[in-house]
Image: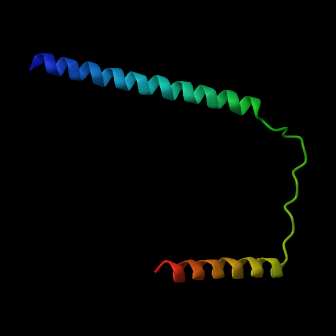
């Protein structure tokens, strides 16, 4: 019984250390990627494209039609 508990504890500790090391390496990699992929903050931000009410209404109509067709075909 004592040997099984010792083995279970060893397996648990090995798994916890493995996860900790992996997550630490993942955080370090994300930090490096953030540094290398950083955008220039002084660059002017692009203005979002303007949308007209007609374009929005057409998009809503297309989505509504697609949802209706999906529901009709998948009942």
Q: How many marks?
A: 0
Image position of 10 with respect to 36: above or below: above
Above or below: residue 19 compared with residue 75: above
Can you give x and y, in whole percent of width and height, for residue 45 in the image?
Answer: 87, 51
Q: Residue furthest left?
A: 1
**Residue at horizontal 84%, vertical 72%?**
51
Q: Position of residue 12 (x, y in %)?
A: 29, 25
> Would residue 44 be found to the left or right of residue 15 on screen?
right
Find the residue positioned furthest to the front: 73
In the image, is residue 44 above or below residue 51?
Answer: above
x, y (%) of residue 58? 76, 80
Q: Quadrant of the N terminus?
A: top left
Picture quadrant where residue 64 is located? bottom right
Q: Nearer the viewer, residue 60 or 39?
A: 60
Residue 26 place in picture, x, y as percent: 56, 29
On screen, residue 13 versus residue 66, left or right, reads left
Q: Residue at x 82, y 82 (%)?
A: 54
Q: State the residue at coordinates (37%, 26%).
A: 16
Q: Residue drawn at (70%, 79%), measured in percent from left and top?
A: 62
In-image side of 17 versus 65 (left or right): left
């Amino acid at each position: 019984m004592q040997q099984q508990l010792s083995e279970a504890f060893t397996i648990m500790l090995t798994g916890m250390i493995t996860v900790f090391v992996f997550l630490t390496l993942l955080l370090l990699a994300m930090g490096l990627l953030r540094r290398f992929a950083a955008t220039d903050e002084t660059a002017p931000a692009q203005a979002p494209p303007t949308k007209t009410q007609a374009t929005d209404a057409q998009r809503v109509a297309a989505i509504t039609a697609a949802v209706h067709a999906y529901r009709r075909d998948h009942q």
